Amino acid sequence: MNLFTGNRRIVRSLYLVILIFVAILLAIFWQPDRPAEISVPLAQPVAKQRIASQLEDVSRVKEPIQPIPLAIALDGNKVVLGKQLFEDVRLSGNNRIACVSCHQFDRGGADGRSHSIGANGTLGEVNTPTVFNVGFNFWLNWNGEFENLTDQLDALLLNPERMGVEWSILIPKLQQIPEYVRAFTKLYADGLNKANLQDAIVTYEESLSTPNSRFDRFLRGDKQALTPAEYTGYQLFQAYGCISCHQGINVGGNMFQRFGVLGDYFADRGNVIPEDLGRFNVTQDPADRFVFRVPSLRNVALTAPYFHDGTAKTLPEAIAVMAKYQLGRSLSQNQIDLIAQFLGTLTGEKPS
Ligand code: HEC
Ligand code: HEC
């Protein structure tokens, strides 16, 4: 064995070592362009809300999203009274604003603004979510602070950025209005008081569901209800893992997740304010920083702008942000468009 062949051998084994090293690196870091592994938890009942017991048996629907019941049995007279209250500016501290000012029916139950303008004229700190289908959410508000509509109502009446009124002022004020006194006395044995006012408004909120969307018709077996493009969008929504967070009857509303799982959304956006800390503001647990209730995507095509900070002006923009920060992906314009088309099929019938 001369010096020359010895060197060749060393070079060859060096090549081999490098090759193995590169192969190991590839095996560790190479991510083929395949959809994320997703595990979709079984749909749970809407345990925390009053109308949970009315959810129909949809065990035959073998999909991670369930249709909204076609009808919900509620006391029609309470619904009518609740509607009057919902639309009455006298519920606000300065008689200038009603629930419907921010939760407008021709804007998908939201207000079309990035931030709402409250009774006192100041800008709110978060975007207005839709009031439609709230009876199916497990938690309420962006940070999921409330588990039922009654507690949520208490807080928003008091909040100077919403209605800005205290019960001790509101109840005597409404008791001066004979029309309300009469209506409450007719429906409730103990007439107009705090509990009954809460009940009337909450009953009305529970009536604000939007059944029979094209997607629900698809879930109920009408395979023609979606166009091929919309169906492809649904497949992408599942394959990319949107469904692992947005699922159940409200296509959201039933879990908490960080905004920025695979990227630092807030660092990229800048100007972090206390409301951006999300669930942390409720629990004070550092693990809950930037964690939010996953919002419902029902009627989402109607409720721009998007996110708790109202920064995404269009649905395609919101989808791209979600793909980037929640899934670590950059979707093509065509994929975004297909998912947007699917989300459009979640628009249901407006409450009458
Ligand atoms: C000034 C605008 C404004 C007014 C007026 C207003 N809201 Fe809201 N509403 C909001 C905003 C903003 C939120 C989100 C609050 C948060 O997440 O911290 C919200 C949240 C809600 C939610 C929770 C939705 C969800 O899925 O989490 C319900 C229900 C609701 N409002 C009902 C009402 C009712 C009933 C009234 C009248 C008594 C009312 N709102 C008045 C702006 C308003
Ligand atoms: C890891 C959980 C998670 C995944 C995966 C996820 N989302 Fe979200 N989504 C959220 C959370 C949390 C928010 C609320 C963010 C905020 O505004 O604070 C949200 C908000 C949204 C909104 C805005 C809703 C509104 O009313 O403002 C849209 C639209 C949306 N997601 C669509 C999608 C799509 C499409 C995908 C897949 C490409 C997806 N999401 C994947 C958790 C997730």
Image: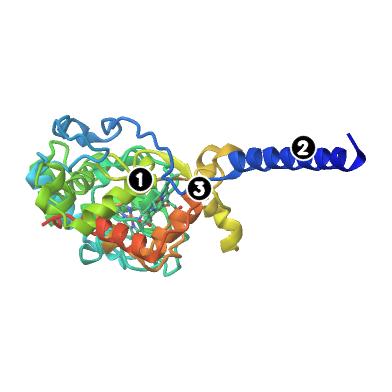
The numbered mark, 3 or 1, whose residue comes first in the sequence reads 1
Q: Amino acid at mark 2?
A: Ser
Q: Secondary structure at mark 3?
A: loop
Position of residue 318 in the picture relative to residue 337 (left or right)? right
Q: Decide which of 25, 42 is in the foreground and name it.
A: 25
Q: Secondary structure at mark 1?
A: helix
Task: Decide if residue 86 is in sight here.
Answer: no
- Mark 1 neighbour density, 10 Å: few (under 14) some (14–19) many (20 or more): some
- The span from disc 3 to disc 2 (Cα, nearest Å) is 56 Å
Name the residue located 19 percent from the left edge and 56 percent from the top edge. Answer: 228
Residue 304, image x, y percentages: 34, 65
Position of residue 329 in the picture relative to residue 85 (left or right)? right
Q: Secondary structure at mark 2?
A: helix
Task: Decide if residue 122 is in sight here.
Answer: yes
Position of residue 333 in the picture relative to residue 215 (left or right)? right
Dot in front, 3 or 2 = 2
Position of residue 341 in the picture relative to residue 1 (left or right)? left
The quadrant of the image that shows the C terminus is: bottom left
Residue 13 circle label? 2
Residue 250 circle label? none
Q: Which residue is mark 3?
A: 278
Q: Which residue is mark 1?
A: 239
Q: Amino acid at mark 3?
A: Gly
Q: Decide which of 150, 302 is in the foreground and name it.
A: 302
Name the residue located 19 percent from the left edge and 45 percent from the top edge. Answer: 200
Say above or below: 205 vs 314.
Answer: above
